[in-house]
Image (tube, rainbow, N blue to C red):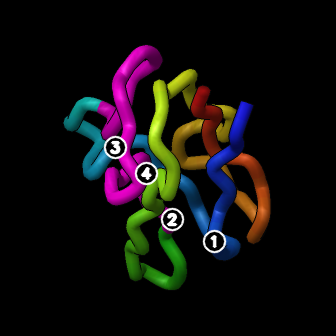
Amino acid sequence: MPDIQSPLPGTFYHAPSPESEPFKKAGDAVAPEDTIGLVEVMKTFIEVKAEISGTFDGFVAGNAEPVQAGDVLAKVT
């Protein structure tokens, strides 16, 4: 099962805002250019792209959870 990893350290978010639905839900199709989450670094939000095609299996990292570069954020099959 391929992993989507954090490109940098920061805080990971599943959705664009607290009121919004997550970018992806388990069972959703993903393409390489799809945004699956955001990493916040010093008040700047960086989009995390899937970079692979497949089916989104779900998030590994919790919403609003601190992450390090290389941490697994989500799984795709």
Secondary structure beneath label 1: loop
Mark linked to residue 39: 2
Main SS, magenta region, reads loop
Tell me the amino acid under the disc marked 4: Gly
Q: Earlier in the sequence, mark 4 or mark 1?
A: 1
Q: Where is mark 3, residue-wise?
A: 15
Instruction: Judge the density around disc 1: few (<14), some (14-19), many (≥20) Cα neighbours within 10 Å.
Output: some
Tell me the amino acid under the disc marked 2: Val
Image spot of residue 72 (x, y percent):
74, 48
Tell me the amino acid under the disc marked 1: Pro
**Contact? badges 2 and 4 (CB < 8 Å):** yes
The vertical placement of 34 against 70, above or below, is above
Q: Residue at 53% x, 40% y: name it.
A: 63
How far, Cα to Cα, is label 2 from label 4? 7 Å
Q: Where is mark 1, residue-wise?
A: 7
Q: Nearer the viewer, residue 77 or 17?
A: 77
Q: Earlier in the sequence, mark 3 or mark 2?
A: 3
How far, Cα to Cα, is label 1 from label 3? 17 Å
Tell me the amino acid under the disc marked 3: Ala
Q: Where is mark 4, residue-wise?
A: 37
Secondary structure beneath label 3: loop
Which segment is the magenta one?
A: 22-39
Secondary structure beneath label 2: strand
- Point out the image quarter for the C terminus: top right
Q: Quadrant of residue 67?
A: bottom right
The vertical placement of 50 against 20, above or below, is below
How far, Cα to Cα, is label 3 from label 4? 6 Å
Image spot of residue 10 (x, y percent):
63, 69
Q: Earlier in the sequence, mark 1 or mark 3?
A: 1
Q: Is residue 21 left or right of residue 73?
A: left
